[in-house]
Amino acid sequence: QVQLQESGPGLVKPSQTLSLTCTVSGGSISSGSYYWSWIRQPAGKGLEWIGRIYTSGSTNYNPSLKSRVTISVDTSKNQFSLKLSSVTAADTAVYYCASVTPTIWGGYYEYWGQGALVTVSS
Amino acid sequence: QSVLTQPPSVSGAPGQRVTISCTGSSSNIGAGYDVHWYQQLPGTAPKLLMYGNNNRPSGVPDRFSGSKSGTSASLAISGLQAEDEADYYCQSSDSSLSGVFGGGTKLTVL
């Protein structure tokens, strides 16, 4: 069974770049069985899709975050990463990494990390 | 403002049946994209509850069922149990391959 674990700083200063890494275990990140995604959830609010990366390295991003987001993959480490630049307090949230099981008509998030709380504050 | 619309809350007594609606548009659900559902217990990550509109992952009780029609979908929970109290989210996709979520529905078991 695939397992995911987020890691990275829990506190980021305003205007700086948020960086998180998701380590995948129980399977190869380049197997082609899944895509890989980041999703966030502000306290007390709903889920917001940030973006996803294919094993080829191609990406899709949430249009509302596209100018600030970069998702990358390191197959040698079985990891994928999120960078979000120019953060503000509005970016404070629990950040989840998840596997995307592709289907003909979209995809679903089968496995999730436990989540990483990132607070933006000076 | 979420792309998919869900009621903020629903409630029911133990043993009853409740449904949670998820309304989208011709850009997502109405375009043919599948709807998936997640259950989130307090303080935990979301868990896949239903995929491909009406398919249950292994381990999900058959008390949970899903359906889709037009630009909407529904999750039904029958034989309501106290352990079902959680937040429920629907999810679909759109033509830009973006993931779209509903705002979430809090289920209270009375």
Image (cartoon, grey):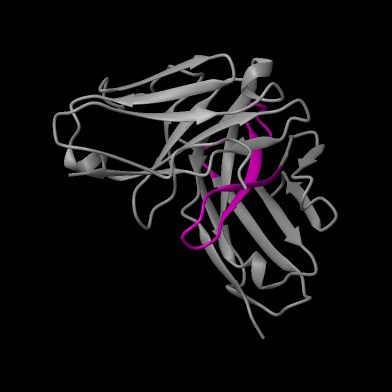
* Residue at 62% over, 48% down: B1
- Asked which quadrant contains residue A58, the reply is top right
- Asked whether residue A51 is in view, the answer is yes
Location of residue A59 in the rendering, given as x and y in whole percent from the top left corner: 79, 39
* Residue at 31% over, 27% down: B60
Q: Is residue B29 above or below residue B11?
A: above
* Residue at 18% over, 26% down: B79
Of residue B80 and residue B8, the one placed in the foreground of this image is B8
Q: Which residues are magenta?
A: A25-51
Q: Is residue B64 left or right of residue A95?
A: left
Of residue B60 and residue B86, the one placed in the foreground of this image is B86
Of residue B41 and residue B29, the one placed in the foreground of this image is B29
Q: Is residue A102 left or right of residue B9?
A: right
Residue A34 in magenta stretch: yes
Location of residue A95 in the rendering, given as x and y in whole percent from the top left corner: 57, 57
Location of residue B62 in the rendering, given as x and y in whole percent from the top left corner: 27, 20
Location of residue B23 in the rendering, given as x and y in whole percent from the top left corner: 55, 28
* Residue at 59% over, 20% down: B71
Residue A97 in magenta stretch: no
- Asked whether residue A28 is in view, the answer is no
Q: Is residue B34 above or below residue A73?
A: above
Of residue B8 and residue A107, the one placed in the foreground of this image is B8
Q: Is residue B52 above or below residue A69?
A: above
Which quarter of the image is occupied by the C terminus of chain B? top left
Q: Is residue A109 left or right of residue A76?
A: left
Number of numbered tags placed on the structure image:
0
Farthest bottom residue in view: A122
Farthest right residue in view: A67
